[in-house]
Image (cartoon, rainbow, N blue to C red):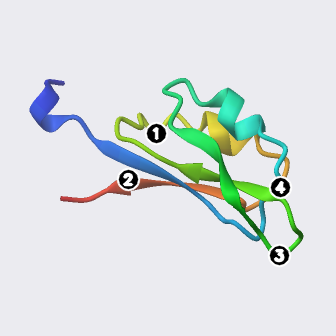
Amino acid sequence: MNQATRKKYRAVPEPDECKGCGRCVRACPKKLLKMGTKLNFIGVPYAVFEGDGCVGCGACFYACPEPGAITVYEIED
């Protein structure tokens, strides 16, 4: 697969499901997740996706203890 046909992905954390543990941040091999500065409804900073180059591996999804807190989407052109 060459660069022109490589699929693109995006990890989307759900702010109000995030408990601020940071497991997804540590699990991301591309370092595209970080803990944000805004607080969610329970008063903790939540994970945010920043950057480009997500490979869709799902490491963040599987590292997260909260069901449904992170979804990995394939970006359609």
Tell me: residue 52, above or below residue 29. Answer: below
Instruction: Please report contact status of discs 2 and 1: CB closer than 8 Å, yes or no.
Output: yes
| Residue name at image x 68 percent, y 55 percent | 37
| Residue name at image x 38 percent, y 47 percent | 9
**Residue 46 appears in which quarter of the rendering?**
bottom right
Residue 41's label in the rendered image is 3
Residue 66's label in the rendered image is 4
Instruction: Please report contact status of discs 1 and 4: CB closer than 8 Å, yes or no.
Output: no
Q: Secondary structure at mark 2?
A: strand
How far separated are the C-alphas under marks 1 and 3? Answer: 28 Å
Name the side, left or right, on which 18 lies relative to 73.
Answer: right
Residue 10: horizontal and vertical position, in percent?
A: 43, 50
**Residue 43 appears in which quarter of the rendering?**
bottom right
Total numbered labels placed on residues in the image: 4
- In the rendered structure, which disc, 1 or 4, sits on the residue that comes first in sequence? 1
Query: Mark 1 sits on what residue?
Result: 56
Residue 5: horizontal and vertical position, in percent?
A: 15, 36
Name the side, left or right, on which 77 lies relative to 75.
Answer: left
Instruction: Please report contact status of discs 4 and 2: CB closer than 8 Å, yes or no.
Output: no
**Residue 61 appears in which quarter of the rendering?**
top right
How far separated are the C-alphas under marks 2 and 1? Answer: 7 Å
- In the rendered structure, which disc, 4 or 2, sits on the residue that comes first in sequence? 4
**Front disc: 4 or 3:** 3
Tell me: residue 55, above or below residue 46. Answer: above
Specify the amino acid type for callout 2.
Answer: Glu
- In the rendered structure, which disc, 2 or 1, sits on the residue that comes first in sequence? 1
Residue 57: horizontal and vertical position, in percent?
A: 52, 34
| Residue name at image x 31 percent, y 44 percent | 8
Name the side, left or right, on which 77 lies relative to 19.
Answer: left
Query: Mark 2 sits on what residue?
Result: 74
